[in-house]
Amino acid sequence: MSAAQNQDFATLLKDYFAKLPKVDEIIKGTVISVDNGAIRIDINGLATGVVRGRELFAESKQYGNLKVGDEVEATVLELENENGEMELSFRSAGHQKVWDNMMKSRDENITVEAKVLAANKGGLMMQVDALTGFMPVSQLAPENYPRVPGGDKNRILEHLKGLIGQTLQVKVLDAHQKDEKLIVSEKAVWEDEQKVVLDKYNIGDEVEGEVSALTTFGAFIKFGTGLEGLVHISEIAWQRIDHPKDVLKVGDRVKAQIIDLNKSKIYLSIKRLIDDPWKLVKEKYTIGEKVEGEVHKVEPFGIMIKLDEQIHGLAHISELANRPIKSTEELRELFPIGSRHAFEIVSIEPAEHRLGLRLFGVKARSEKQEEKTAKPEAKEESKEPAETSEASE
């Protein structure tokens, strides 16, 4: 063989080895046989690879029913085994492929299926393809979100356990293969669906729906096609209420106005569809007028009085007796909730939705203060004659 031929052969050999994959590298190839518990793959005409034994384990569904001619990916375990073939694995390649798909789903906002495997107080363990991910409670769609009064963690966990075994449509929020971290969200799918429907609505629109849930901070109203909005407790009624259940119950049909659309979140108001009764309060009541009202609530600083369905007033604790009331317990004994009493109106502030009351017959604060300052002066005057008589003696 000539020197030129030797050089050409050396170059070809160098190119051949340069093109050969390295251990742990993922290669692409074509299935050339499937038999005897092994799959043989042609690797671009450079070598024949074999996947056998435990390395046939399918990390992804794509390796379940392979046939001759299929294009596949595999990971190189050894460059040459005892038969001169390249030893390959579907397991690592499948694992990598699944992670690639998860990152693609995250980047392209693709909806995927996920099965609920287990539940803890923080959320759900999810099977997403061949991976295990996590969905925090906050990422559940409204229909699956645990609306538990008082946020009882044990009751929340019971609700979450009821979802085990279900398959949910989710979006991938976070996918980090290095940390094996996969976070998914059902709420994100719901939000995308909401956005499409919400295009039909504008701020100021009036809607009618059904009260679906009551919480300490407000009421949820279902309306339209699968939409749900929140009426904050301050937007339920013009009068002050302690809990939405004071005026609403689940199942009630109500009308509300859309006051804000924040992405997929809908905020509603019931009271804005009703004229503010406080605008006309001075036409109904006057300062100094004697009125009768019902004790609605007892607070450490006084009692809330219901004058009518819309107007509630406050009688400060100092306006309820001519002597100091020492405790809230004493206040409750004197003014049980539901009891009716006569009061005098002492102030009306429509803009602040405030009306001040005094129990009828109780002296004004100024009068009581005058009495307090007057009594010590009387004592001083009574001492002077005594001192004078002693001196004369």
Image (spheres, grey):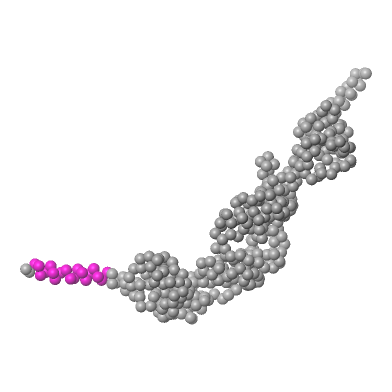
Can you give x and y, in whole percent of width and height, for residue 215 in the image? Answer: 57, 63
Name above or below for residue 252 compared with residue 176: below
Choose between 150 and 342: the one closer to the eye.
Answer: 150
At x 43%, y 66%, the residue is 299
Q: Is residue 86 visible?
A: yes
Name above or below for residue 168 compared with residue 354: above
Q: Quadrant of residue 16?
A: top right
Left or right, 160 with reference to 389: right
At x 56%, y 61%, the residue is 149
At x 71%, y 45%, the residue is 131
377 magenta-colored? yes
Name above or below for residue 164 compared with residue 30: below
Can you give x and y, in whole percent of width and height, for residue 28 in the image? Answer: 83, 38
Can you give x and y, in whole percent of width and height, for residue 78 in the image? Answer: 79, 30
Magenta-drawn stretch, dominant element (helix, strand or loop): helix
Q: Is residue 171 visible?
A: no
Residue closest to the far top: 2
Q: Quarter holding the C terminus?
A: bottom left
292 magenta-colored? no
At x 76%, y 38%, the residue is 91
Q: Give the magenta range.
A: 373-391
Q: Quarter holding the N terminus?
A: top right
Q: Quadrant of residue 2?
A: top right
Can you give x and y, in whole percent of width and height, for residue 119 in the image? Answer: 64, 51
Choose between 300 and 383: the one closer to the eye.
Answer: 300
